[in-house]
Image (cartoon, rainbow, N blue to C red):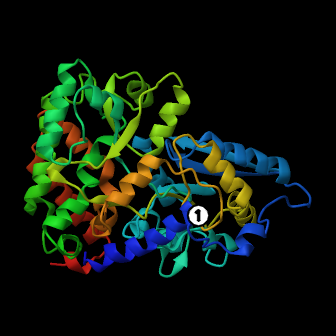
Amino acid sequence: MKRWFPLVMVVLLVIGLLSGCGGTDTSTGENESSGQGEGTGGTKKDVTLSQMVSQGWTSDADEAISKKFTEETGITIDWQVTPADQYHDLLKTKLNAGEAPDIFWIQTNPFAIKTEIDPEKNCIDFSDEEWVRVMNLARLPAVSYNDKVYGLMLWPNSPEYVFVYNKTLFEELGITNPPTTYEEFKKDCGIILDKGITPIYEYVAAGWHHVLPFAQIGGRYEELHPGLYDELNNNKIKYADVPEMELALSQMKEFADLGYYGDDYMANTGEDAQERMATRKAAMLTANPGDIKQIKDDYPDCKDEFGLFLIPFVDNQTFPFNPNGPARFAYKNSKYVDEIKEYFNYITNKENLQYKLDNTPGMTNLDVTVDIEQHWLPQELELMDKIPKEKYITVLQSAVKYTNEQWMEIGKDIEGMYMNAMTPKQILENIDERRAKMAKAQGDPAWAQ
């Protein structure tokens, strides 16, 4: 991908940050005071909308808002929460069978939206809805196709999936600064392990989390090979041709072999991640900044301070910028199009956006144009401030075609690597093979030969 893409994204990101931090009010009076969905005042409807979502993408706050919506309108929201490792295939099956739920979520990506859900065939066009303006401009490409808006993304603008670390523990062990290179990282993990503490809490059983260290440092691959994203997207180079990608996987495997992920990382599900961090059973966790807030909220007796640092595999120091995230879409053949629009209007009004932010564990901000009270942590603002803007580069899965779509398959391959059943090179070759199949199925001209 050409360098202008990350730079354009940075400009849009800055706009979003200014809005979120209160530096500039990018909202309109209409967005704030229009009272979208704030009670219908009419007859309540005996309607049920099905809403299918992957585990981990929603929270109790979303369900509480939907219950309030039901009280005011009579429209019930039937939440269908599906395990993450089953969600993608189940949704595809339902869409192909013409039996999709009224509302469904996907992990958005402008490259993937056609292959994932074929929005022109399956989704309601929301382009003319007022709530579209609630989303910041940087989010719109991920929920749009052929200049029409099909989805609603309400997601934070935090540094996405960096390392949360126990700053107090580091200082006690004589680690004065978080690592910025692989060798520093390995050395620090050795010091921590020698004290009987698991350096990094990793959880492979969830199916998706252990892919992050490879993908979130995509900016480093691009930095070392300017134009790499563009070459990958035009089939001029393959994953298996990039030595730093193989190096990243090799370093991840070395960490596993050295015991830096602990003894149970293959069976870990992530459900006890905050507890492990709060009780010093683990020193680091690949997570979002909001996890610091969640640790403090859930374990008030924990007096340790926590900080953030970038994933330093392959000596990475690029900021993992990602304008994409989970988003809602609606089924074009639903019998309840008007009710779906009413629901989307309702959840995007100022009161409900504020409620979502205030009551979602681990969420410190929402990337919206509405002027709500954000809860940025000083740790995330500090990290964002010290990273030069030219190092804000889009993560691999959002910049390279046919990558995010095979996230769970990549996870299975990395799991195989950890079990000594696959090499880093074989993982990259598998990624290339799956990319080629997807590209040819979509008629991508770059794969025509």
Q: Residue 115: x, y in percent?
A: 39, 66
Question: Is 113 rendered above or below residue 343?
Answer: below
Q: Residue 182: x, y in percent?
A: 14, 45
Question: Is 330 rendered above or below residue 148?
Answer: above
The quadrant in which residue 434 appears is bottom left
Question: Is 359 rendered above or below residue 369?
Answer: above
The quadrant in which residue 266 appears is top left
Q: Nearer the viewer, residue 183 or 63?
A: 183
Q: Residue 215: x, y in percent?
A: 27, 54
Q: Nearer the viewer, residue 25 or 395?
A: 25
Q: Residue 264: x, y in percent?
A: 28, 23
Q: Nearer the viewer, residue 387 or 283?
A: 387
Residue at disc 1, secondary structure: loop
**Residue appearing at x 88%, y 54% in the figure:** 44
Question: Is 258 rendered above or below residue 59?
Answer: above
**Residue appearing at x 27%, y 65% in the figure:** 391
Image quadrant occupied by the N terminus: bottom left
Residue designated by label 1: 22
Image quadrant occupied by the C terminus: bottom left
Check disc 1 and give the amino acid type.
Answer: Gly
